[in-house]
Image (cartoon, grey):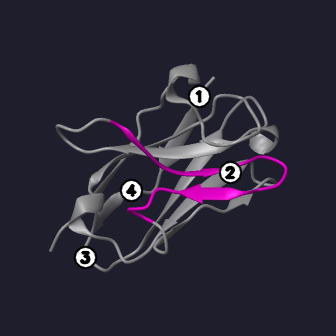
Amino acid sequence: VQLQASGGGLVQPGGSLNLSCAASGFSLNYFAVGWFRQAPGKEREGVSCISSYERTTYYADSVKGRFTIPRDNTKNTVYLQMNSLKPEDTAVYYCATDFKSLCWVKEADVDSWGEGTQVTVSS
C-alpha cells in the first residue's frame, strides 16, 4: 500500500507546479495526507498536511502563503499547488499517510514511501 506522487519538473524561480498524490487499492478519503520533501544532503521534512474529515490544512513556515494542499475525494487524490517557487524548494517530493485522520502525518508510522517526484527550481 503506497501513495504515488507525480507532477514534478524543472521550473524557473517564481514559477508554479501542481503535484498530485494518488492512491491505489484503498480510499484516501478517511485519512490525513502529508507532503514531504528531501533535498540533497538534507533530512526529509514535512511541507504540508491535510486532515481527513475537517480538511484542516497545515503548512511549514517556509512554504506558508505559497503552497496549498487541496484534496479531491471524488478522484481519490491530494494535490500540492506550489506558487512563487524558490531555488530552495528544489527537492524530491513525497506524499504519505499514516492512516490516521489528523495531521501531522508521522514519518515513523508511514509503512511505505513511493518514489517521489523531483522538483527543480532553477534559471
Other-residue count near label 4 (Cα within 10 Å), few / some / many at <14 / 14–19 / ≥20 = some
Looking at the rendering, the stretch of residues picked out in magenta corresponds to 44-63
On the rendered image, what quadrant is the C terminus found in? Answer: bottom left
**First along the sequence among labels 4 and 1:** 1
Q: Quadrant of residue 83?
A: bottom left
- N-terminal-most mark, 4 or 3: 4
SS assignment at label 1: loop
> Does the magenta run of residues contain 8?
no
Residue 2 numbered tag: 1
Query: What residue does disc 2 label?
Result: 77
Q: 74 and 88: which one is in front?
A: 88
Identity of the amino acid at label 1?
Gln
Which residue bears the numbered disc 3?
13
Position above or below: 11 against 8:
below
Indicate the amino acid at tag 2.
Answer: Thr
How far is the residue under mark 4 from the one under mark 3?
14 Å
Residue 69 horizontal/vertical position (percent): 60, 61
Residue bearing the label numbered 4: 8
User: Which residue is pictured at 75% across the width and 53% down the height?
Assistant: 75
CA–CA distance between discs 3 and 1? 31 Å
